[in-house]
Amino acid sequence: MNGGSDETDGVIHQANPHLTLNSDDTLFHLGLSTDQNLEEKFGDVKFVCMGGSTSRMHGYAEYLAKELQIQDATLEDLCTTDRYEMYKVGPVLSISHGVGMPSISVLLHEVIKLLFYARCRHVKIIRIGTCGGLGLVPGTVVVSEMVVNEAFEPVYQVFVLGKTEKRPTHLDKALGDEIAACRPSDAGYEVVRGKTMCTSDFYEGQSRLDGAICDYTETDKMSYLQSAYDNGVRNIEMESACVASMCNRVNIKSAIVCVTLLNRLKDDLVSTPHDDLKKWEMRPQQLVTSYIKSQINSI
């Protein structure tokens, strides 16, 4: 499946036979349940934008409301727990996902169920965030064309009933191309397409030398990162494989859009001034918002 085929009229595929539209269900970590009118509240959602930080996604909701000129945006947290934060701006949800695949996996299970119960169609899920680059000028935005794991395989590994499953991590090519094409000619930064390596750890999993544990050398690190580059990897982050895999399973188109904060072929630590980093963090938001604005009139 290519993450959102029109052959099913944009309906979210039900990948759990134990659930139905009439299920009595609690979305525990969001603090929502099916005894609320989820279709009335969320049935018009077409875009779900996810990022790690709660403050960043609140700021993105404010930015969206201004850019889309939506006066009745919900800029108060819709979650009733402190695990994640979620805001609604017209047909867009802006949600924080925390750090790493375990955190975003929990969120995606509940967000996908929310979209299913709300009878949403033609939804697109887009992760917007930061990453480490490979061979790119810091500040470059990468729109992922494929997600691979630490062994450069296009799979997401998950344990089910004690057994390992490897699920494909394909992304929707057309969606990625459309987002990348929304870069303004005077943007002042590059947008590239390339493979994204998704890791399960920030330190050893990404070949850093500054973690609490490290059993390899600088030469080992550089050899591995060069191999990643030679395999087409252009950035490294910690959530994309889970996003791509889960969206594939339920017929939702997905994209990963991240700005590089450093070139890992040169540095392990970010040395860019804070003010510049804040500007760079806006680049994926601006790019994705331009895409949403280009689509919103056709919804």
Image: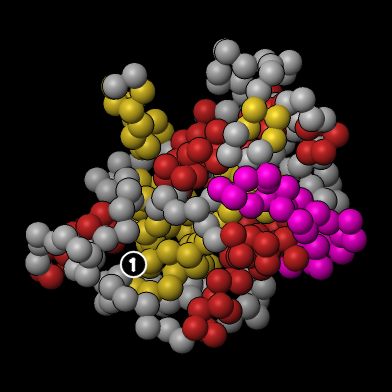
- At x 48%, y 76%, the residue is 139
Q: Quadrant of residue 38?
A: top right
Label 1 CA crowd tier, 10 Å (few <14, some 14–19, many 20+): many
Compared to residue 201, the image places residue 16 above or below, namely above
- At x 64%, y 28%, the residue is 26
* Residue 102 image point, x, y percent: 42, 42
Q: Is residue 297 left or right of residue 92?
A: right
Magenta segment, which residues?
63-89
Compared to residue 187, the image places residue 255 above or below, namely above
Q: Is residue 277 left or right of residue 6?
A: left
Report the label total: 1
* Magenta stretch prevailing secondary structure: loop
| Residue 119 seen in render | no
In-front residue for pair 33/261: 33
- In magenta stretch: residue 75: yes
The residue identified by callout 1 is 134
Compared to residue 202, the image places residue 210 above or below, namely below
- In magenta stretch: residue 44: no
Q: Quadrant of the C terminus?
A: top right
* Residue 272 image point, x, y percent: 42, 84
- At x 78%, y 38%, the residue is 42
* Residue 219 image point, x, y percent: 10, 68
| Residue 288 seen in render | yes
In-front residue for pair 276/122: 276
Amino acid residing under circle 1: Leu
* Residue 188 image point, x, y percent: 58, 81
Q: Secondary structure at mark 1?
A: loop
In this view, which residue lies farthest toward the top?
Answer: 17
In-front residue for pair 125/41: 41
- At x 67%, y 73%, the residue is 184
